[in-house]
């Protein structure tokens, strides 16, 4: 899941025929950025100890060409991520 082509990482499966293209919009740059961000997110989740076996991270773009990362988690994993986010938020508040 950490790199393009790994199980759960779906950013590398871009299908240019499956989208509507608008002339003049740079979708490739946004998609590349989203692919990198998806890899970063997968790495961070793994480093935080989150069980990402059933997670799906997808790189995509919006209509204006901006990169988008879509994250799909099981309910159990979503609760783990929410707990980690709350803990991190508490630490950031104390540090600030």
Image: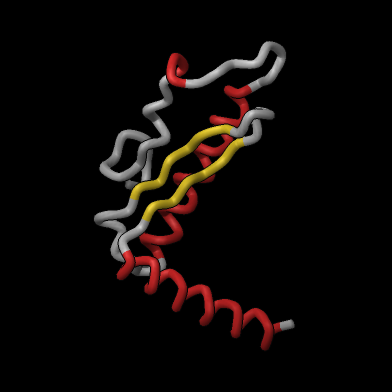
> Can you give x and y, in whole percent of width and height, for residue 57 in the image?
40, 46
> Can you give x and y, in whole percent of width and height, for residue 75 in the image?
33, 66
> 78 left or right of 21?
left
> 7 left or right of 69?
left
Residue 9's quadrant in the figure?
top left
At x 60% / y 84%, what residue is drawn? 90
Q: Is residue 53 above or below residue 9?
A: below
Q: How many marks?
A: 0
**Image color mode:** secondary structure
Q: Give the quadrant of the C terminus.
A: bottom right
As drawn, the residue found furthest toward the right would be 96
Q: Is residue 53 above or below residue 17?
A: below
At x 30% / y 45%, what residue is drawn? 8
The one nearer the camera, 90 or 65, is 65
The one nearer the camera, 79 or 8, is 79
> 76 left or right of 43?
left
Q: Is residue 50 above or below residue 73?
A: below
At x 68% / y 83%, what residue is drawn? 93
> Can you give x and y, in whole percent of width and height, for residue 37 in the image?
53, 45
């Amino acid at each position: 899941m950490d790199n393009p082509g790994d199980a759960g990482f779906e950013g590398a499966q871009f299908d240019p025929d499956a989208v509507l293209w608008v002339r003049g919009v740079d979708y490739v740059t946004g998609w590349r950025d989203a692919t990198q961000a998806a890899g970063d997110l997968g790495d961070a989740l793994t480093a935080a100890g989150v069980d990402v076996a059933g997670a799906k991270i997808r790189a995509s773009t919006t209509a204006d060409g901006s990169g988008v990362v879509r994250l799909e988690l099981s309910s159990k994993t979503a609760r783990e991520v929410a707990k980690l986010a709350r803990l991190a938020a508490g630490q950031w508040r104390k540090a600030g």
